[in-house]
Image (cartoon, rainbow, N blue to C red):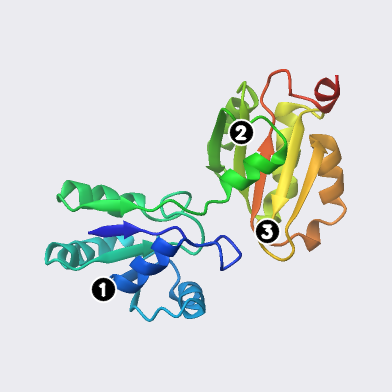
Amino acid sequence: MLYLIPTPIGNLEDITLRAIRILREVDLILAEDTRTSRKLLDHHGIDTPLRAHHAHNEHTAINGVLRDLEIGRKLALVSDAGTPGISDPGFLLVRECLKAGIEVQCLPGPTAIVPALVQSGLPCDRFHFEGFLPHKKGRQTRLKYLASLPNTFALYESPHRLVKCMEQLQEFCGSDRAVCVQRELSKLHEEAHRGSIAEVLAFFKGRADKVRGEIVIVVAGLGKENSREEEED
């Protein structure tokens, strides 16, 4: 059995009782970064062995993981934060396990996209999740596509690329499109900045060198809520 265990995106208390129990019961935990995962395990008094399993070694490590599972060992996969496979390693291992007839269970739990959408104030009954945009090739194609969507869309971005991303969103979506940029969700310095793309871009341009942490950008779709003026009407 392979368990996919969502882990807190910030606050270490944001983990389910079932996740804690399974992390104690499995024979081995595969971790994106063993140092990060060890802090979580120590906080909850879990001493299960850890093994590194990340984007740089997953292709070479999969056969060994499959052998462990085939002889009856129970393994859990965790990423640094959130749900494995969602903008984190996990898909490749799940696919190979299913091909080999090994049962896979993913527990419900933390992911940054859901709280970011819900507290953005933008419609979230239907939405598009983009994850991280390509750094270079295909980036403008994706931005053009996102700008044309009728529903809210959300993407992840790194602090040092935030201003550039906002500038590109302004270019493709227009200055008046409503946006909410959220940083450090569930952590001590969590914050959200809402307004038009032009307004939020101006705010971050003035403090680009001070932006830290994980960022989720939620943008209104090309519909009746596409700008603050229309929203207020």
Residue extending furthest toward the left: 71
Q: Earlier in the sequence, mark 1 or mark 3?
A: 1
Q: Determine contact: label 1, label 3, CB under 8 Å.
A: no
Percent across and percent down for residue 61 are 27, 65
In this picture, residue 190 sits left or right of residue 108 = right
Q: Determine contact: label 1, label 2, CB under 8 Å.
A: no
Disc 2 element: strand
Q: Residues within 10 Å of mark 2 (few under 14, many from 20)?
A: many
The structure residue drawn at horizontal position 21% and vertical position 47%, both measured from the top left corner, is 98
> In front: mark 1 or mark 3?
1
Looking at the rendered structure, the kind of residue marked 2 is Phe
Residue 57 sits in quarter: bottom left
The structure residue drawn at horizontal position 72% and vertical position 66%, both measured from the top left corner, is 188
> In front: mark 1 or mark 2?
1
**Distance between mark 3 and mark 2 Cα atoms:** 19 Å
Q: Earlier in the sequence, mark 1 or mark 2?
A: 1
Looking at the rendered structure, the kind of residue marked 1 is Asp
In this picture, residue 23 sits left or right of residue 98 = right
Disc 3 element: loop
In this picture, residue 185 sits left or right of residue 113 = right
